């Protein structure tokens, strides 16, 4: 498993995707704002069907359309993000989810799927 388990207030999470499915939004902060460093964190949110509040790669919109997430950089502080989420109407929320589904179904989104990873790996192995 790599990291030593540390105690948490509510215990461990057996399945991250199943856990975050219970929420409308998910805080999705990368460990760095390095260009191109977009990890599974935002894709886990997409898979769970929640809207990510993203902070990370400064060029994230080269990978993921900006209408698929709430960009934390556009807000002065956490309170402003909270107020934005709290005030969001259902229509706007559903629009984010629709944008996410469309992105995942697109050619650009396909590049980040497990299927594409497996196919690319198999192609690489068979050519080696």
Image (spheres, helix red, strand yellow):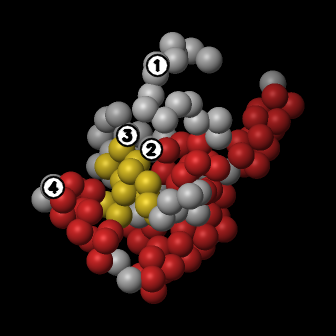
The answer to whether the residues at label 2 and label 3 have Cβ atoms under 8 Å apart is: yes
Could you say whether the residue bearing mark 3 is in a helix, strand or loop?
Answer: loop
Q: Taking 17 as reference, is 96 above or below it?
A: below
Task: Tell me which numbered mark, 1 or 2, is placed earlier along the sequence.
Answer: 1
Q: Taking 97 as reference, is 59 above or below it?
A: above
Mark 1 residue crowding within 10 angstroms, few (<14) / some (14–19) / many (20+): few
In the image shown, does 41 or 65 lie closer to the viewer?
41
Question: Which residue appears farthest toward the bottom when viewing the image?
Answer: 91
Could you say whether the residue bearing mark 2 is in a helix, strand or loop?
Answer: loop
| Residue in the image at 40% along x and 48% along y | 28
Indicate the quadrant where residue 48 lies.
Answer: bottom right
Q: Which residue in the structure is indicated by mark 1?
A: 6
Indicate the quadrant where residue 66 lies.
Answer: bottom left
Mark 1 to mark 2 CA distance (whole Å): 25 Å
Q: Which residue in the structure is indicated by mark 4?
A: 77
Q: Is residue 17 left or right of residue 128?
A: left
Task: Tell me which numbered mark, 4 or 1, is placed earlier along the sequence.
Answer: 1
Q: Which residue in the structure is indicated by mark 3?
A: 30
Tell me the number on the disc at residue 38.
2
Between disc 4 and disc 2, the foreground one is: 4
Q: Is residue 26 left or right of residue 46?
A: left
Mark 3 to mark 1 CA distance (whole Å): 20 Å
Tell me where residue 59 appears, x and y as whole percent. 33, 52
Tell me where residue 102 appears, x and y as whole percent. 60, 73
Task: Tell me which numbered mark, 3 or 4, is placed earlier along the sequence.
Answer: 3
């Amino acid at each position: 498993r790599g990291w030593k388990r540390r105690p948490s207030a509510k215990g461990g999470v057996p399945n991250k995707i199943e856990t975050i499915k219970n929420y409308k939004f998910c805080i999705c902060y990368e460990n760095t704002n390095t260009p191109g460093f977009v990890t599974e964190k935002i894709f886990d949110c997409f898979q769970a069907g929640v809207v990510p509040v993203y902070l990370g790669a400064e060029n994230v919109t080269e990978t993921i359309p900006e209408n698929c997430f709430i960009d934390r950089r556009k807000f002065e502080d956490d309170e402003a993000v909270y107020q934005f989420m709290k005030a969001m109407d259902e229509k706007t929320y559903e629009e984010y989810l629709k944008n996410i589904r469309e992105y995942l179904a697109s050619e650009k989104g396909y590049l980040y799927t497990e299927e594409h990873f497996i196919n690319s790996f198999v192609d690489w192995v068979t050519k080696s």
